[in-house]
Amino acid sequence: MTRSQKLELTWVGKDERPRLEPRILVEDATLSYHASARVSANDQFDNLLIHGDNLLALKALQQQHAGTIKCVYIDPPFNTGQAFEHYDDGVEHSLYLSLMRDRLEILRSLLASDGTIFLHCDDYEQAYLKVLMDEIFGRDCFRFTFTWQSADSPSDNKVPVASDHDFILCYTREPGIHSFKPLSAPGVLDAYSNRDEHGRLYRDRLLRKNGKNSLRTDRPSMWFEIRAPDGTSVWPIHDDGREACWALGKAEVFRRLNSNEIIWKERKKKDKVNWIPYTREYAPENPTRPHPTIWRELQTTRQAKQHLTALLGASNQFATPKPEPLVARILEICTSPGDLVLDSCQ
């Protein structure tokens, strides 16, 4: 491979690009919905609902919003070969890739330096879209593939295997730069069952490491002697007699010993007292946990349809609505109040 060559996805017509002239957005005052004047500096007049060809709309947004969008969520046609009321979901594969490439390139230019894009798809085009996004954003900017359980019952009982999930490809604008936030998890507090004299929740954890890589041979530098309150020698030993290791390094263990942060508990065994060291861990004020990449607990398409019917009536039903909790999860991952968010429909 020469320096001029690179790994890329190729298809018929890839080098053919549409000519896009600069565009401007023109407000239709009869369709605008906001107050006639600002009452305070906190009034929001920045939301835009743009009707028209999405490629031309994205081109128009470049002039004012290039490099400003914090989060992009797109739910393009999956190219399943079906014909829906509002769009054609079965264009020729090469044409589909060209259409997606043209839009993804502009979307990348709209993202802020710490911006993130989420692309919703299924098995029909997922593999090709992944390679296409690697090419446009760079493989170093790929973050995660989220899997959403979109169905809770098979749509066709006659087939041997029924697909019940979608994919959401996640990329950042720049490698290593993001503003991801963990998932709020109040249930984490259930693991803290004790309170100290100040009312703070806490739990005590063995200073001896358990589980994977917990043997002396795994961490030789973390096998060392410490002294119990009565001066006896204490080593990290598993209950089955195997030589283990401490969960913290030597410097940190002795720092905690010197500052009385190690909790000693007595355990009697066959009329012998053993001293067991623990570390005390206090409950976080705002408990969180990492986001999973498999989303089973969110609403399914069926539940989203029920919600849409309740809001708009059966006559306004859409075939494949995305549940509000799904979109909320995406926004929770990488946005804060006041951030610009873009959803460009195909």
Image (spheres, rainbow, N blue to C red):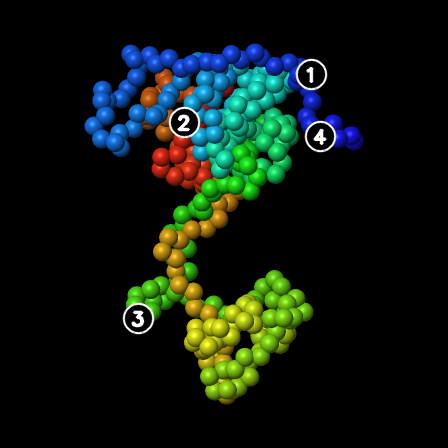
Relative height, residue 85 to residue 178 (above, below): above
Determine the residue positioned at 55% across, 25% down. 104
Q: Which residue is mark 1?
A: 12
Residue found 30% across the figure and 71% down from its top: 197
- Frontmost residue, 265 versus 150: 265
**Inter-mark Cα distance, 2 to 3:** 51 Å
Of 283 and 186, which appears nearest the observer?
A: 283
- Secondary element type, mark 4: loop
Whether label 4 touches label 2, CB < 8 Å: no
Disc nearest the viewer among 4 and 3: 4
Instruction: Tell me which amino acid carries mark 1.
Output: Val
Q: CA distance from mark 4 to mark 2?
A: 41 Å
Residue corresponding to mark 2: 305
Circles 1 and 2: CB distance less than 8 Å? no
Residue farthest right in this picture? 1
Identify the element where label 1 is drawn: loop
Task: Return the residue nearer the eye: 150 or 252.
Answer: 252
Which residue is under mark 3?
A: 197
* Among numbered discs 1 and 4, the one appearing first in the sequence: 4
Frontmost residue, 109 versus 313:
109
Q: Position of residue 42 (x, y in %)?
A: 26, 32
Residue designated by label 4: 7
Question: Mark 2 or 3 closer to N-term?
Answer: 3
Relative to 238, say whether 4 is above or below.
Answer: above
